Amino acid sequence: MGNPHHLAHWYPTAAYLYIMGLDALALAWEYLRRHPDYRLDWRRRARRPDAAQRWGLRLLEDPALDARDAQPAWQPGHAAVVQLYPDADPPVDAELFSFWRIPGHKQLLHDGKGLVLIARSAGHCLRFSLAPGLEDGMAVAYAYRGRGVTHAPDTPAPMARLRPPPAALLELHTLQALDATLAGASSREVAEGLFGANAVADWYSDGGLRSKVRRLVRRGDALMRGGYRRLAQLAPLEKGRFESNAKRP
């Protein structure tokens, strides 16, 4: 009889390959959506409309949606989110806002405070916050943290780039190990799912592999329980505030 974990949702590494193409904000969502208390807040959202602030969001997002479909409305602060304003005193050659000229697959949503435009294309992701009154064809000024307000031709807007392969593979393994642990898998079963049956043939004599798996599990748990805030460039929670009462995996 085969290993029942072969049928578990966390076992096929191929199901996690999309993680390789995520930027920091999308990764933050992947860790947050796995938090047991976040999932509980989502189920009770009708009774707790203000629960989103606890997690650094303006609105609660469905944790069943992965980063390919979810559009979490993060609280402001991330340097990759560019603010677009009508230019009140544009030069003759002012940049004009043109929705359809922005490269990539575009998504427009309301985050509870205003319109947000997300444009994804190969290798990067652009996120814009659209000021009220901005219309297609208007002269536009760009504002983003750390660079002030400028016109687009002078200073290109920052973009959230994909992580390099070694860092991306680390996130894939971390999330897969986290899911396996949350599902009740043992460290050896986690190792088999991540690295294959041959890798765990000498499990009890290979302390290096066991240590690696334990580090991945600890890393995933830490990112899920607050470390994701660093990825989203959110302020860390005050010590003791909103601490989880959920049982650790």
Image (cartoon, grey):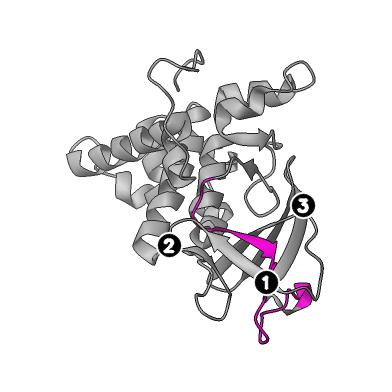
Q: Residue at x 58, y 74 (%)?
A: 151
Q: Position of residue 218 (x, y in %)?
A: 34, 33
Q: Most extreme residue toward the front, as rendered?
A: 89
For residue 103, side relative to residue 37 (left or right):
right
Amino acid type at circle 3 is: Leu
In the image, residue 188 sits, relative to residue 88, either above or below, namely above
Q: Which residues are magenta?
A: 77-100
Front residue of 95/27: it is: 95
Residue 44, by quadrant, is: top right
Instruction: Indicate the secondary structure of the residue bearing disc 3.
Output: strand
Amino acid type at circle 2 is: Arg
Label 3 neighbourhood size at 10 Å, few (<14), some (14-19), many (20+)? Answer: some
N-term-proximal mark, 3 vs 1: 1
Residue underneath mark 1: 89
Label 1 neighbourhood size at 10 Å, few (<14), some (14-19), many (20+)? Answer: few
Residue 99 visible to an observer of this rendering: yes
For residue 24, side relative to residue 217 (left or right):
right
Q: Residue at x 37, y 19 (%)?
A: 239
In the image, residue 158 sits, relative to residue 193, either above or below, namely below
Q: Quadrant of the C terminus?
A: top left
Q: Are marks 2 and 3 in contact (CB under 8 Å)?
A: no
Front residue of 6/214: it is: 214
Amino acid type at circle 1 is: Asp
Q: Position of residue 108 (x, y in %)?
A: 77, 58
Tag shown at residue 163: 2
Distance between the Cα atoms at labels 2 and 1? 38 Å
Would you say the magenta stretch is mainly helix, strand or loop?
A: loop
Front residue of 228/140: it is: 140
Q: Position of residue 16 (x, y in %)?
A: 54, 53
